[in-house]
Image (cartoon, coloured by chain):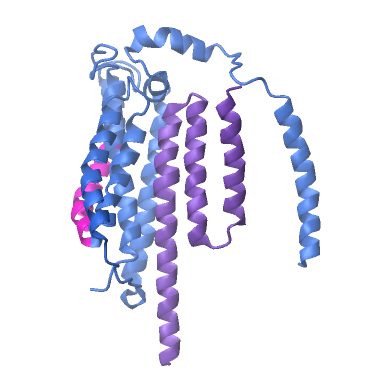
């Protein structure tokens, strides 16, 4: 086995654990995006460059974007509800 | 359920699952051990049969092109679903729409996005065009092009993104991309061959034109996936529009 593989697998395990243990969803995105990038590198080391490219764009760009927009929407909504309560 | 009960339930399911997993993984063949004939045959004949160097693309868009068509329509239906759900809520009750004030962009972010956007778009198109030869292809190229337009939002905000991702332009293009895949396959039927037969001139492996319909389908997928990502991200961004 390629020695880089051990390093990548160890880092994958670390970032997967960090992702799970981070409780704030807005902060969770960052270890998750790093995890996606490491996963893409591991695909590359395992000689699957096609999957690497898909995982890079989807895991590090698209999914964090969708989650961040959703969180922004929820926060804006909570702020609006709170405002309505204060007035009423 | 108390915390104690939760730990018990977790333990009861976790321990046997972990045991099965370790048992299964320890029985796996070594990495790189490949007993099947299929991959070796494709590697041996793919080059002269289809004039393509990237066997993953050759399998995806030619030998097993029918499967990829199904996958492409999963993406198509998902994007349509996102658009349907988010737009319906918009129509139902305008007053419940949440808005979010747009934050100021730093000059550096604006300039960098302005520089990166065209480079990344061209890179994505390059990747799809060279699908039959180098790693990547229509899906990867489309995903890169589709997400590249987020630089417009990152650099200058909603107005710039909305100017690029005009729904009335992007939607027909997405439908065209989805239709082109089936269309390319159907032409083969009119020529008296099977669906998705490679009937175009195969070109030269390693050149821009190589692989016949593999190349053509890559372009169709680039169009479908690129506009699909653009449409889906646009629908999400509309949910956090700044107040008018």
Hey, which residue is sitting farthest front in the picture?
A: B108
Vertical side of B88 occupied by A15: above or below: above
- Where in the figure is residue A59, as x and y percent of width and height? 45, 44
Q: Nearer the viewer, residue B235 or B112?
A: B112
- Where in the figure is residue B64, as x and y percent of width and height? 43, 23
In-image side of B4 versus B176 (left or right): right
Taking the image as drawn, is residue A28 in sight? yes
| Magenta portion: prevailing SS class | helix
In-image side of B46 versus B148 (left or right): right
Quarter holding the C terminus of chain B is bottom left
Which span is picked out in magenta?
A: B159-178
- Where in the figure is residue B14, as x and y percent of width and height? 75, 47
Chain that is blue in the image: B
- Asked if residue B53 lies in the magenta stretch, the reply is no
Vertical side of A73 occupied by B30: above or below: above
- Where in the figure is residue A6, as x and y percent of width and height? 61, 31
Q: Nearer the viewer, residue B102 or B235?
A: B102
**Picture quadrant of residue A82:** bottom left
Hey, which residue is sitting farthest bottom in the picture?
A: A88
Vertical side of B158 occupied by B18: above or below: above
Chain that is purple in the image: A
**Picture quadrant of residue B184:** top left
Quarter holding the N terminus of chain B is bottom right
At x 41%, y 18%, the residue is: B55
In-image side of B20 versus B244 (left or right): right
């Amino acid at each position: 086995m390629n020695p880089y593989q051990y390093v990548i697998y160890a880092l994958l395990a670390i970032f997967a654990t960090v992702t799970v243990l981070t409780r704030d969803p807005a902060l969770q995105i960052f270890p998750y995006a790093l995890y996606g990038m490491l996963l893409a590198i591991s695909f590359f080391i395992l000689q699957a460059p096609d999957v690497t490219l898909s995982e890079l764009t989807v895991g590090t760009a698209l999914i964090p974007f969708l989650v961040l927009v959703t969180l922004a929407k929820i926060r804006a909504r909570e702020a609006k509800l709170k405002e309505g309560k204060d007035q009423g | 359920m108390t915390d104690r009960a939760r730990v018990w339930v977790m333990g009861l399911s976790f321990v046997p699952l972990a045991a099965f997993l370790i048992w299964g993984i320890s029985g796996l063949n070594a990495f790189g051990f490949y007993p099947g004939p299929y991959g070796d045959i494709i590697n041996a004949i793919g080059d002269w049969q289809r004039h393509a160097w990237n066997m993953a693309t050759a399998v995806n868009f030619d030998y097993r092109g029918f499967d990829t068509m199904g996958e492409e329509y999963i993406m198509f239906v998902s994007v349509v679903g996102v658009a349907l759900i988010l737009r319906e809520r918009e129509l139902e009750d305008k007053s419940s729409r949440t808005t979010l004030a747009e934050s100021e962009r730093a000059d550096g972010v604006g300039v960098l996005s302005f520089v990166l956007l065209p480079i990344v778009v061209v890179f994505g198109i390059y990747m799809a065009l060279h699908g039959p030869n180098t790693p990547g292809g229509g899906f990867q190229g489309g995903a890169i092009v589709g997400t590249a337009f987020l630089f417009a939002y990152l650099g200058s905000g909603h107005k710039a993104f909305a100017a690029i991702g005009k729904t009335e332009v992007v939607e027909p293009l997405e439908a065209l991309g989805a239709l082109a895949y089936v269309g390319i396959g159907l032409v083969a039927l009119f020529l008296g061959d099977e669906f998705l037969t490679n009937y175009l001139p195969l070109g030269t492996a390693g050149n821009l034109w190589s692989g016949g319909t593999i190349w053509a389908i890559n372009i169709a997928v680039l169009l479908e996936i690129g506009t699909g990502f653009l449409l889906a991200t646009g629908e999400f961004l509309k949910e956090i529009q700044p107040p008018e």
